[in-house]
Image (spheres, coloured by chain):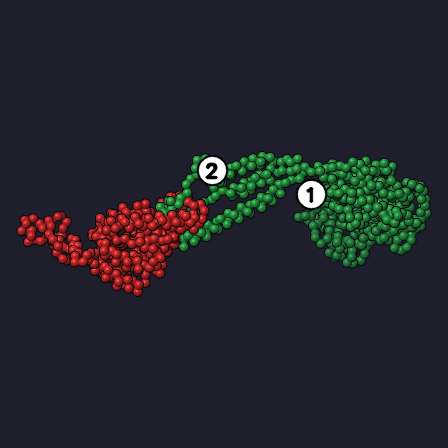
Amino acid sequence: MLSFATPAWLLGLLLVPLIRWLHRGGPHRRAVPVASLALWRRAGTTGPAAGERRPPDPAWRRRALVAALLSLALAGPRSAVEVERVTLWVDDSLSMLTREDGRPRLVRGLELAATELAGRHGAEVEVRTLSQPWEVRRTLDAAVASDLVSAAGQHEPSPPPAALWRSDREHWLVTDGTSAALDANAYARVIRVGDTRRNAGLLRLSARRSLEDRDRLDVELQARNGGEGAEERVVVLSSEAGEIIRATLRLAPGESASLSASTGMNSRLAARLEPTDALEADDSISLDASELAARRVHADPACPAPLLAALRAHPALSIAGETSDAALSVDCGTGKAAVSRAKLRFVDGGTRQPLDGPLLWSSAVDPASRRLGAYRWRAAGQLAPPQGKDVVLLASGAMPLVVRRADDAAAVIETSLDVEAGPRDDATALPLLVAFLVDEALSESLLDAVAVTAREPDAVLVAPRTAVEAAAGVRATVMASDTRSWSRLLLLAVLFVLPWELTALLRRLRRERVEAEAWSQ
Amino acid sequence: MAQPHLNPATLPAQSELQAFARTAAHLLAERRVRSPGARVVKRRPGVGMQHLDHRDYVPGDEVRHIDWRQTARRRRPIVRQFESETATDWTVLLDLSSSMATHGASKWRAAVAGAAAMSYALLELGHRVGLLAFGRSVSTECPRGRGRTHYASVVRTLGALRPVATGEPSDLGACGRRLHGDSAVVVFSDFLADDEMRGGLAALLERSSSLHALQIADPADATLPATGEVDLVDVETGARITALADGRAAALAVEERAELARRLRAFCQRSGIAFTAWDVARPWQQTLIEHLARARSVC
């Protein structure tokens, strides 16, 4: 069925009879100058007799064709065509990597989908994964399948975004049916793979700095039975220094269990289950604990003893000599701070004065870090007024107390709070101040650091849900209606005819010029 | 249409002019008898030395020409008349209309060569020569003069002339009002006009002692550079007619041109005008010599 986007342009077709009428005088006649018309009077042609029409200039057809094609193209002709469009949603969760018959479930599912799609000749296919739905692939070949398998297991599936759930497309799903987040009934075709129903996997490995000993880590390991039968596994936790702990876990179907341990400061931790099962990917887990290591701090020897004591008491800091790899340097006025990526500068003008009023926190400071307001601080000097991109983190009245200086080379935190005597009422205020300043200087929260590697709780589930089993099957094909625009084709035709007309005009112009030059010789 | 340019090569060379002048001297000086035994006596009053007759004095006559003896005898003022010296004054008329500029102005170049040659020959013989260029009116005039220095003036005048490409008709009668005294007139033109300029020739005949008409014709005037249906535009009037440019049309045009020349020739014969049809392909020397020879039996 042909329709037009802007039918008003069809009025341009009225130009066709107008062009025909304008060319009624016949072919274009050249004007030839002669010395005297008297010589040619007898050669003059007679006018058309009554009722006799002269043939129009043949060029009218070409020009009318251009006008008609242009009018039709601008009118936007379009016809409806039936197009079969299929979106293949691929469940690329961890469980799809369960090996069955020597290959992952995902490979098997993609093979089945490719076979199904091969039977839909002419269908427009796009392949999307449930973890990365905005990334589209236009074919499903071996290279795409390999790419999908290598990228699988990063996220558990979630329903496709509504914007991609277009009604003019047929939506297929390749899944093992382990996720409860997927509504299998919404899909026109569900290709379910996977028969394995037993699995145990590691869900989480976390570590944090021990509260009793800053040089040790508290480690926690969590495992879960994702199958339908009881499982017994040996858990082995190890580090770079060797095996830390080995324990046997017995897990009922769906049950989780945790294992705690303490170990020295290590940068890498790993855990594994023995023996492995069909889903090997969840039988091991590793953790990078390097971020929990103490930060090296270079302290100015001129710093007051209470400040040095507070720095030593900080669990995540270690006082080091003047080294070039210090993460933080503390300057108390001597200017001998080591080169580092962050710097604390304590300003001491020699006079002590009470604050103008209550502490005022900048919105740039995390509310959880605002723990200094309960103490009666004093100022040991006057900070330079903030310039340019400097940020006042803490102030009292009009007096800035803690300022982050804009410095491209290092993060510089300046404070004029008195750290020599500290608040008079509580000796714990200074460590809190140091913790706050260090966190601001290093832009991280050192006291609460926890290193975690975790999988989603359902990642270890391998048994399909009953609803998915019921939904799997073929449904009626959805034929999407699409419109095909003919404007481009018509414009191409115009671009073909227009040079034809221009060439004809140029040839006539050139011929007349040559003849005129010959005439004037 | 390009404006024709008159370069030095358009004018005849000095050697050609001298050769032509020697030949033309005999034709301009001698008069052939009309019939054996007859003597042509053609005496006209005018400016000269030979006494011709007497007549009554009219206001404006020069006092020194009063014949006092006859005045005393007849008791009224009587002046002497002198015989006009034959063809002492010549005027060359040059058609400057747009039709002379067609086809590369071949007709114009021929007319210029003819006018220059005639002027040179006449000045060599001691005649006074003037030049008038005319279109719808007299556009340029070189007063009569004598001698070789005057030929330089004539050449300068000719060099400055340019026929207008379009829109300039020709009115030969306009030249009649510029003719003073008794002079012979030579007209170089294509005579392409509705009446072949017969009216203008008749008017000139009244004011000249003898009249020469050289019709310059270009065969290209009867050809068209295109085929098929064309609009023919008269370069002088701008009038248009539609014609089918083919061999038949060219043949009709040739016939029409021949008929035009025939009518003009017949008119000139009846009026005692020396007429020559000059095809631009012919050399000007041959054409002018033939014309002068023919003119001796006419004028």
User: Hey, what amino acid is under mark 2?
Assistant: Arg
Q: Which residue is mark 2?
A: A53
Mark nearer the N terminus (2 vs 1): 2
Q: Is residue B37 visible?
A: yes
- Amino acid carrying label 1: it is Ala
Question: Can you identify the residue that label 1 sits on?
Answer: A398
Q: Quadrant of residue A129?
A: top right
**Chain letter, red in picture:** B
**Subunit under mark 2:** A
The C terminus of chain A lies in which quarter of the figure?
bottom left
Q: Residue at x 54, y 38 (%)?
A: A16
Q: Is residue A228 left or right of residue B214?
A: right
Determine the secondary structure under disc 1.
loop
Q: Is residue B299 left or right of residue A323?
A: left
- In the image: residue A271, left or right of residue A496: right
> Which residue is located at x 31 percent, y 50 percent?
B261
Q: Residue at x 34, y 53 (%)?
A: B217
